[in-house]
Amino acid sequence: MEGSTFVSTHTEQTPPATDPGAPRMIIAVDGPSGSGKSSVCRAAATHLGAGYLDTGAMYRAATWYCLDQQIDLDDEEAVAVAVEELPMNISTDPDHQVICVGSQDVTDAIREPRISEKVSEVATNRRARSLLVAAQRRIIDEAGFIVAEGRDITTVVAPDAQVRVLLTASAEARLRRRGAQLGGTQDAEALKKQVLERDKKDSAASNFTEAADGVAVLDSSDLTFQETVDSLIGRVQIAQEDAA
Ligand SMILES: Nc1ncnc2c1ncn2[C@@H]1O[C@H](COP(=O)(O)OP(=O)(O)OP(=O)(O)O)[C@@H](O)[C@H]1O
Ligand SMILES: Nc1ccn([C@H]2C[C@H](O)[C@@H](COP(=O)(O)O)O2)c(=O)n1
């Protein structure tokens, strides 16, 4: 997939046409925080020549916007209205991940701990959620061949996906990985807050700890990063052979 593909959740911007030669296949991946969804799915999408959708980034951008607009996150109505007007553009190019709110590039800002600590409040707002789910379905449909990851992709956003995987890892592995990813800047308490406590809050909105019917479990606790990527790619290749 060349260049960057921007799709919008709000504006009338038309996304570029997908490669007409590309096979139509949706790969849906869910899992808890730090299980490796973003990094593994991005690498798999690059290898496969597929698009990549980080739905968590959309919830994060919505949270960034609400905070920027000084919206009280306890005010369900105000949050829903903000998400309705959210001028968000997200790239589906796995090699060029950019997310903008209006003209502002928030790609790095949405990863800050202040967003991680608040994002569950937006993700558990039912109206905000249904707006973002609708946008995600449209993005996936327009891409045609895409790896989409989050918490409810296998169950709500794309339950008909040809490949459906729950990517898991032990709490210990997830905390260790997230700590290393943040360069050792966070103490154990802060990490627990950002990983385990966030999972607990997010569980109110979707079930990403047990695989739904037809969803395969990929436990990466004892796998290297590359082994995990290869396992996901292998499942896609089997689905492609079955479809041929
Ligand atoms: N199998 C693995 N072995 C070792 N490290 C891994 C493995 N899978 C992922 N990682 C690393 O773990 C870290 C967390 O992964 P990642 O950010 O992809 O998780 P995530 O599930 O998307 O988390 P979140 O939902 O919180 O965004 C990254 O630094 C990634 O490179
Ligand atoms: N499909 C999704 C994706 C994400 N969320 C929520 C849960 C997380 O706290 C937050 C950020 O996601 P992350 O970047 O950590 O993957 O968004 C969700 O509810 N549904």
Image: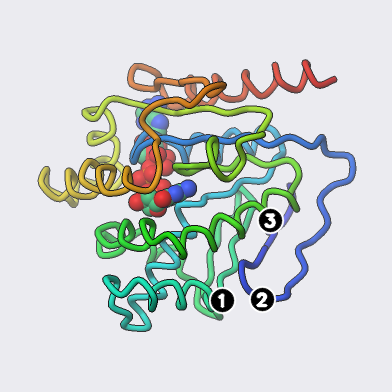
x, y (%) of residue 1?
Answer: 73, 47
The residue at the point 39 percent across, 18 percent down is 223
The residue at the point 70 percent across, 59 percent down is 5
Q: Residues within 10 Å of mark 1 (few under 14, many from 20)?
A: some
Give, as a three-letter code, the residue at label 3.
Arg
100 relative to 112 in the view: left or right: right
Give, as a three-letter code, the residue at label 2.
Thr
26 relative to 151 in the view: left or right: right
For the residues labelled 3 and 2, say whether their Cβ atoms are less than 8 Å apart: no
x, y (%) of residue 208?
Answer: 40, 35
- How many angstroms separate mark 1 from mark 2 (CA)? 7 Å
Give, as a three-letter code, the residue at label 1.
Pro
Q: What residue does disc 3 label?
A: 138
Q: Nearer the viewer, residue 210 or 187?
A: 210
Q: State whether label 1 is within 8 Å of ligand 2.
A: no
x, y (%) of residue 165?
Answer: 53, 27
The label on residue 215 is: none
231 relative to 1 in the view: left or right: left
The residue at the point 24 percent across, 30 percent down is 171
Pick whichever of labels 1 and 3 is earlier in the sequence. Answer: 1
Numbered disc total: 3
x, y (%) of residue 65?
Answer: 41, 75
Q: Nearer the viewer, residue 70 or 100?
A: 70
Pick the quarter of the image with the C terminus: top right
For the residues labelled 1 and 2, say whether their Cβ atoms are less than 8 Å apart: yes
The residue at the point 48 percent across, 26 percent down is 212
Pick whichever of labels 3 and 2 is earlier in the sequence. Answer: 2
Q: Nearer the viewer, residue 15 or 79?
A: 79
Q: What residue does disc 1 label?
A: 87
Q: What residue does disc 2 label?
A: 11
Q: How is the image coloured?
A: rainbow
SS at mark 1?
loop
